[in-house]
């Protein structure tokens, strides 16, 4: 004899949440489903319990049941929002800003950005250690960059709404929008007490991961210029016919490796034509990171052998990711430009090059993101990003929340960039001087 069970609205929500949790624990845990007064209870016994390992979902269901029966405004009860909110709350309890849930819309936006084209203000967002919406870096020549948004800025309001308690997905959803639309942000700059209002018109953001050039330059003690500009810097000019290569790496996305190969092929030919080539500047300022495999690929251009990064899992086991190919720039002098917006994969590359080749980092201290996330698509087009390991530089340094300190500290002078028609800001010029020493 069969029994037909009619599930209430909240029982459906509970089962949806339970099914998502069961998907995570499947294969590694013992799961028991019980029914008590027609209420689903999931008890999960982990094989690797962090603290007892027994998760009783009856408390969760009891709260849902009470909301269902007592909440006064039934129209606000949305099963999807409740499910997403419960998942976000579960991940939020880990107090890890990089372990997060992306609903379908935000997941699509995240993937679109890595693909290199999207509509918005052009800023990589993250969460600070005290869970505030933070600008990791503005993208090159984006509306955010042109509006004066800087790495490390805190976004305290979006269109008048306080961002306290927001998740990263909420921030992305509210700040992104169609081309031509306007968003008003309350921005708290680093070391400032009061926020300022910034209005930004959204645009289509096309992110070119890699750009570069080879130029003849001359430098005195505090300035560098192109030789063919005809300007005179004074009597203390060094290597007037010297040339340097500059490579700007803005992200580690879907197209980065292909764009890198094309640019390096061209630059290497230009470098061979130079008679007094001094070296390469690799600029990863305001590069928020991206794919780990791309970081290993890029670092391999400058390293002959050895490990690029060390992964350490929850058990303390370590796994080394080593050079994967024969690079063409392994013997050239090198300087790496960094700043507060250099995060994650950027720090992996910078750390590996300094540990192995003793090259100098020029600029400002990096962001300090020392964990690796695994992004997994789940039902309905959503995704979950989970921190699966910490990463260390080849010398075993963990940069999380500390960053990499530059060997040559140079605070960015925005006026130097605006005044210099060649685009040689003061940090780029300092990097050139280091190569010409």
Image (spheres, helix red, strand yellow):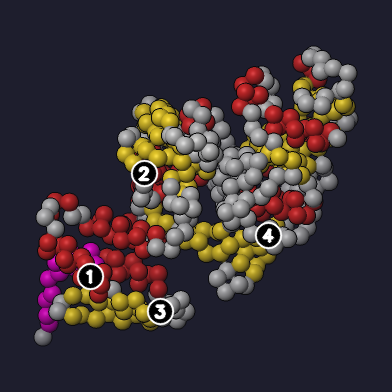
Residue at numbered disc 1:
61
> Sequence-wise, which precedes: disc 1 or disc 3?
3
Q: Are marks 3 and 4 in contact (CB under 8 Å)?
A: no
Q: Residues within 10 Å of mark 2 (few under 14, many from 20)?
A: many
Q: Residues within 10 Å of mark 1 (few under 14, many from 20)?
A: many
Spatial CA span between label 1 and label 2: 29 Å
Q: Are marks 1 and 4 in contact (CB under 8 Å)?
A: no
Spatial CA span between label 1 and label 3: 19 Å
> Sequence-wise, which precedes: disc 3 or disc 2?
3
- The disc at residue 163 is 2
Residue at numbered disc 3:
53
Say whether residue 8 is magenta: yes
- The disc at residue 397 is 4
At which x and y percent is residue 26?
40, 75
For the N terminus, the image quarter is bottom left
Residue 92 against residue 361 in the figure, above or below: below
Residue 432 against residue 69 in the figure, above or below: above
Residue drawn at the location 34% of the way across and 76% of the way down = 55
Residue 264 visible from this viewpoint: no
Residue at the outermost front position: 193
Q: Residues within 10 Å of mark 3 (few under 14, many from 20)?
A: some
Residue 200 against residue 138 in the figure, above or below: above
Q: Which residues are magenta?
A: 2-14
In front: label 1 or label 4: 4
């Amino acid at each position: 004899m069969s029994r037909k069970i009619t599930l209430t609205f909240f029982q459906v929500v509970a089962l949806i949440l339970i099914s998502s949790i069961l998907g995570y624990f499947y294969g590694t845990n013992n799961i028991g489903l019980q029914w008590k007064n027609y209420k689903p209870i999931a008890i999960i016994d982990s094989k690797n319990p962090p603290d007892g390992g027994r998760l009783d979902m009856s408390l969760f269901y009891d709260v849902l049941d009470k909301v269902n029966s007592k909440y006064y405004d039934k129209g606000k009860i949305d099963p999807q929002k409740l499910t997403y909110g419960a998942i976000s709350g579960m991940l939020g309890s880990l107090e890890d800003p990089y372990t997060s849930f992306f609903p379908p819309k935000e997941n699509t936006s995240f993937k679109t950005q890595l693909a290199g084209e999207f509509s918005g203000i052009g800023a990589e967002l993250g969460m600070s250690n005290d869970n505030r919406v933070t600008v990791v870096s503005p993208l090159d020549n984006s509306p955010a960059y042109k509006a004066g948004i800087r790495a490390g800025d805190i976004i305290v309001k979006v269109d008048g709404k306080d961002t306290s308690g927001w998740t990263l997905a909420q921030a992305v959803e509210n700040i992104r929008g169609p081309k031509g639309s306007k968003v008003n942000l309350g921005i708290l700059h680093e070391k400032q007490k009061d926020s300022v209002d910034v209005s930004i018109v959204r645009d289509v953001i096309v992110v070119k991961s890699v750009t570069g050039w080879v130029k003849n330059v001359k430098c005195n003690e505090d300035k560098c210029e192109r030789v063919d500009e005809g300007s005179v810097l004074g009597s203390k000019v060094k290597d007037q016919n010297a040339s340097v290569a500059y490579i700007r790496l803005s992200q580690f996305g879907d197209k980065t490796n292909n764009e890198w190969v094309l640019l390096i092929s061209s630059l290497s030919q230009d470098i061979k034509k130079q008679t007094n080539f001094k070296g390469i500047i690799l600029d990863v300022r305001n590069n928020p990171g991206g794919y780990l495999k791309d970081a290993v690929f890029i670092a391999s251009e400058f390293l002959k052998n050895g490990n690029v990064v060390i992964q350490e899992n929850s058990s303390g086991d370590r796994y080394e990711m080593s050079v994967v190919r024969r690079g063409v720039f392994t013997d050239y002098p090198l300087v790496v430009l960094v700043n507060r917006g250099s995060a994650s994969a950027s720090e992996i590359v910078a750390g590996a090059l300094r540990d192995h080749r003793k090259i100098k980092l020029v600029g400002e201290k990096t962001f300090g993101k020392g964990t690796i996330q695994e992004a997994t698509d789940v039902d309905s087009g959503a995704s979950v990003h989970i921190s699966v390991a910490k990463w260390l530089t080849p010398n075993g340094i963990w940069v999380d929340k500390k960053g990499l300190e530059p060997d040559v500290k140079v605070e960015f002078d925005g006026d130097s960039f605006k005044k210099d028609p060649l685009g040689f800001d003061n940090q780029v010029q300092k990097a050139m001087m280091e190569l010409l020493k």
